[in-house]
């Protein structure tokens, strides 16, 4: 899911691709942000790009 979001998809676009609800995406995205220590999608994308 983090890869889908890091690829600059909106929550709504991610729901369509992953067959999940918007609430589910928001919940898991918040958990991912906390776990990785990032505050927004830009930081998530940068972290993903840096890690390869």
Image: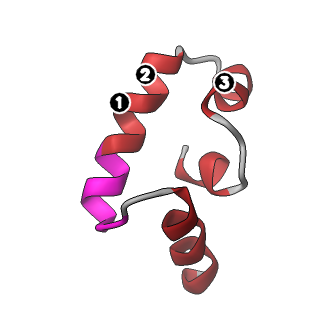
Q: Residue 38: x and y, percent?
A: 36, 65
Between 17 and 43, which is closer to the camera in this rendering?
43
- CA separation in Å, label 1 and label 2: 5 Å
| Res. 18 image quadrant | top right
Query: Mark 1 highlights which residue?
Result: 27
**Residue drawn at the location 26% of the way across and 59% of the way down:** 35
Q: Residue 46: x and y, percent?
A: 58, 76
Is 17 situated above or below 21?
below
- CA separation in Å, label 1 and label 3: 13 Å
Task: Kindly identify which numbered label has been placed on residue 24.
Answer: 2
State the SS at label 3: helix
Contact? badges 1 and 2 (CB < 8 Å): yes
Between 18 and 39, which is closer to the camera in this rendering?
39
**Residue drawn at the location 36% of the way across and 51% of the way down:** 32
User: The magenta stretch spans which residues?
Assistant: 31-38
Q: Residue 9: x and y, percent?
A: 72, 42
On the picture, is 19 further left or further right than 51?
Answer: right
| Res. 30 image quadrant | top left
**Residue drawn at the location 71% of the way across and 52% of the way down:** 8
Magenta includes 52? no
Is 52 situated above or below 48?
below
On the picture, is 20 further left or further right than 13?
Answer: left
Query: Mark 3 highlights which residue?
Result: 12
């Amino acid at each position: 899911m983090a890869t889908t979001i890091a690829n600059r998809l909106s929550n709504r676009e991610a729901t369509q691709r992953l067959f999940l609800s918007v609430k589910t995406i928001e919940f898991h995205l918040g958990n991912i942000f906390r776990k990785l220590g990032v505050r927004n999608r830009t930081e998530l994308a940068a972290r993903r790009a840096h890690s390869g």
